[in-house]
Image (cartoon, rainbow, N blue to C red):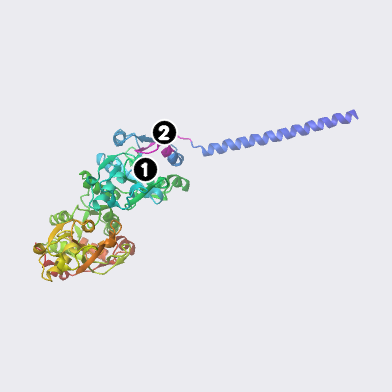
Amino acid sequence: MLNMLNKFKILNFIIIFLIIFFITSCSRNESKQSIKSKAETNTILTGSPLVIGLFNVDSPQQTFLQLYPLKTFLEKEIKRPVSIDISADFDEMAKKIKEEKLHLLIIDPAFYCELKALYPEKIFPLVKPKGGQGEASSVFVTKENSGIEKIFDVVNKRLALGDKRSSFSYLIPLSMLKDLDLSLNDFSKVDFLIKDKRIALSVLLGDYEVGALSEIVAQTYLNSGLKIIKASEKVPVYLIASTNSLKEKESFKEIFSSLPEEVLSSLKVEKFVPAEDRDFDYIRVLIKLFKGKDLIEYGPNTIKVAILPLYSPLTIYKRFDPLMRYLSEKTGREFKIVIPKDFEEFINIVKKGKVHFSYQNPYVYAILSKGGYAKAIALTVGEDCTDNPSEICGGDKFRGVIIVRKDSPIKNIEDLKNKKILIVSPYSAGGFLSQKIYLEKRGYKLKKDFHLIDAKRQEKVIIGVYKKMAGAGFIRESALGVFSEEVDISQIKILTPTEFLPNWPWAVVKADRDLERMVKETIINLPDPILKNLKVKGFRPVDEKEFELLKKYVNF
């Protein structure tokens, strides 16, 4: 019995030993697998860090968190440490670029343009964001229940802006104001608070009645009582550029163009697309306009196309740059827009042969053609609809209108005599010539019978009539729909439509016959996406005889 008990104890000991051995072996194998798995996921990083530079961020901590997935992804891809460097201001970043301490830059388009001008051989665009929060508007904001409903209500109020080198809190807001015949002089006080977050908070606290900043920052305060009263068109919030310290530029362009979903999600963008320096020429136009710095460069072989400035530089760029790229693709030559500040500068640069092609209203064309400075190659078909500017109406002719306020004592054209009348420009077709022909056919002499005031822009005429700065205004018929958001159009009425004119022609200024032929054929056969972006139905061949009537009214 004792012997049996001893055997049982020995058997139990052997079983327990085997179980412990088995568990230990499994644990050891799992540990080895864990170590192996960890070794596979932890990439060995070698070499000096790749440094990503930023500046003027509202929250460094939030910026680091947002960029962390990008940092770790890049480290895995390039097997090199990646660090984030935040500069306090523009000058500090410029100094680091000069000393070659940065490899990649995530920067505002306006900062890029100024840095590129400082170091043209040190900075190169790689990619720009598309979709999500990678594209945004510049917005004017106020506090809920402030009594400010439209942009014109901001006159004589306190305004908060950001950094004077910023696209979204300085340059684009100034352009928006200029389009509406407003300037910083129309505010009782203007301060520059540098950061967008400070602008939003200062408006909410009541230190300023109005602020201008990025839509992305403004949206975070909408539930706290902030209200958007005016927004620009959407543009890239930033771009990613490389410095000459980064040698693998093309490979990084490919890396950014194929980021995984988790990285894109952390950056709050849909994707990144390749960027070119020309993508930011619209910002350079604004820098020239508001800061007096001419940063726009054209290569010696660039084909320059002047666009008569009917709308703001940003609107013109958004409409016409895709066409320029399409022409470049079809002809093998680089095409770029030239945006003059006004009608007079447009005429001057065409007369001096500083551009190769031009796009203008029929009256300006008649002036240039009569002097032998331009030759029409195609005519526009279609324009913005008066009652719905998102649609395309009309044909190969358009007309002007005479507008007055609904509460005006002016009831017919006879009542216009000796009144102040705002015109777009003496060179405007829809905002002067159409009305001139109409009135002169009825026996009126413009200079003798009316007090004409040159307002320079379509929207300025509408605004002037709305604000009772003049009794009437001459504008293009479609302009009422385009600017309906800025003024209460219900307070404006059309006194009478005026004379029909040929639509806008494309013209050649100086180009060899082969290039002229290629451009003409391309414009007449544009694909639908380009036409839709231009907001026209198409372009057709044109005969010079179509402008003979207009030339009779041109005092060359």
Say above or below: 275 vs 307: above
Determine if residue 436 is in view: yes
As drawn, 206 above or below 417: above
Q: Residue at x 41, y 48 (%)?
A: 269
Mark 2 to mark 1: distance in Å? 48 Å
Rendered image: mark on residue 349: none
Tell me, yes or no, if residue 253 can be seen here. no
Question: For the magenta stretch, what is the residue range?
Answer: 44-64
Q: Position of residue 106 (x, y in %)?
A: 36, 42
Viewport quadrant of the N terminus: top right
Q: Nearer the viewer, mark 2 or mark 1?
A: 1
- In the image, residue 264 sits, relative to residue 515, either above or below, namely above
| Residue 119 higher or lower than 443, as above or below | above
Front-lying residue, 447 or 145 = 145
The residue wearing badge 2 is: 47
In percent of width and height, residue 212 lies at 31, 46
Q: Amino acid at mark 1?
A: Leu
The amino acid pointed to by label 2 is Gly
Crowding at dot 1, Cα within 10 Å, few <14 / some 14-19 / many 20+, comes out as many
- In front of the other: 11 or 532: 532
Residue at image mark 1: 204
Left or right placement of residue 446 versus residue 49 in this view? left
Residue at 65% across, 35% down: 27
Task: Give x and y (percent) for residue 551.
Answer: 12, 66
